[in-house]
Amino acid sequence: MQNISIKQLPSPSVVVDEEIVRRNCKKMIDRSKQLGVAIRPHMKTHKTIEIGKFQVEGLEFKKVIVSTLQEAKFYAQSGYFKDILYAIPIAPNKLEQAASIHSSIDVLHLMVDHPDHVRALVDFRVSNNAALAGKKWSVFVKIDCGYHRAGADPCSPKTLDLIASITKDNNQHFDFQGIYTHSGHSYRQQTPKEIAAIALEEATVAGQMGARIREAGLPCPIVSIGSTPSSDPAKPIDFSRYPIGTVIQIIPNHSCLTAAMFSNYQILKGITLFELT
Ligand SMILES: Cc1ncc(COP(=O)(O)O)c(C=O)c1O
């Protein structure tokens, strides 16, 4: 630990105020408890074990979500995170790495949103059972709730067929977790009312889809929704404090941090700066 001034840091550097990060993590955990729902925080922005631990502090289950298999491997190797969801529909060329991570922890959940994914997973498991240490694949079906980045169409009968192909026809290869949707378009909204509308749409689309799956006689243990803005639309950014033309720096800034791949974070604790390696 060193007593150095923030001005001495090389530029660019990432500086994290530990107290603020911990407070924000606790806020999200408290919000999930208030709503009576389980929470699975995302690791992709900070990519550190330390902040990941803050995000699940005090929770019975330390479940996390990641955006690359590299991140999944990193969290799996920590020995602390044993239930990881890789949140991008799985590409067939990634199955070997996915199998290796899945067999090294309790579970690596994968996403599917097309019959080709199911076929690839089944084919891989039939010919590489040893790579999975005998485990089934654990999957969520990703649903598109209006973001249109990925996910099966919740209104299409083909989506029910997809779920049936996992839970009935190929049941011996899969542990089906349920459905998952992410309202990433909530970030584009300008007002609390617009964010609330997205949150309602997301919850309605996913809730109705879950009900339809069960009405069809199929299992749907988990219905998972969420994004940071839609988690509490009553408390969005107070735009009245920022007149038109104000430059707002959004922290965390996903794309910047993800692209820059800083190897060190400068941690600010009170007035002391020290480095996390
Ligand atoms: C698929 C998926 N789920 C969840 C999240 C987490 O959203 P947020 O960062 O708004 O909490 C993201 C973030 O981009 C995502 O891509």
Image (cartoon, rainbow, N blue to C red):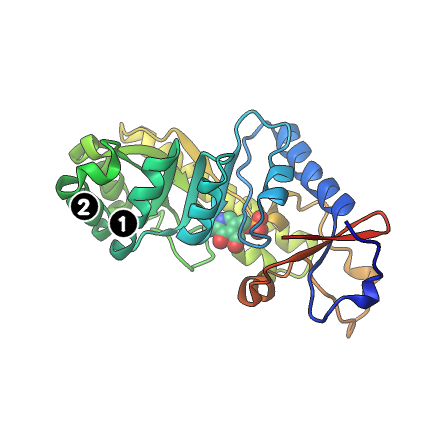
Q: What's under tag 2, amino acid-wise?
A: Phe
Q: Give residue 238's position: percent from left, percent from top.
A: 78, 55
Label 1 belongs to which residue? Answer: 95
Q: Tell me: 150 left or right of 271.
A: left
Q: Quadrant of residue 28?
A: top right
Please give the name of the residue rendered at 81% of the width and 60% of the height, measured from the top-left corner.
240
Residue placed at 81% from the left, 67% from the top?
Answer: 8
Residue type at mark 1: give it: Leu
Q: Which of 60 and 128 is in front in this view?
A: 128
Kind of element beneath mark 1: helix
- Number of numbered discs overlaid on the protein picture: 2
Image coordinates of residue 231 in percent, x first then y, are 62, 43
Residue 123 found in image quarter? top left
Does label 2 or label 1 sit earlier along the sequence?
Answer: 1
Residue farthest left in this picture: 127
Asked if residue 186 is positioned above or below residue 242 in the image, the reply reads: above
Most extreme residue toward the bottom is 245
The x and y percentages for residue 7 are 83, 67
Answer whether residue 90 is visible to the viewer in this image: yes
Report if the CB atoms under discs 2 and 1 are less than 8 Å apart: yes
Q: Mark 2 points at which residue?
A: 124
Image coords of residue 140 (percent x, y): 36, 40
Mark 2 and mark 1: Cα distance apart in space: 7 Å
> Residue at the location (60% across, 66% down)?
256
Q: Can residue 140 be seen in this view?
A: no
Give the left or right position of residue 16, taking residue 197 as reference. Answer: right
Please rate how many residues cluster around mark 2, counting C-alpha atoms within 10 Å: few if below 14, some from 14 to 19, many from 20. Answer: some
Could you tell me which secondary element the residue under label 2 belongs to?
Answer: helix
Q: Is the residue at mark 1 in contact range of ligand 1, meaning its CB lies under 8 Å from it?
A: no
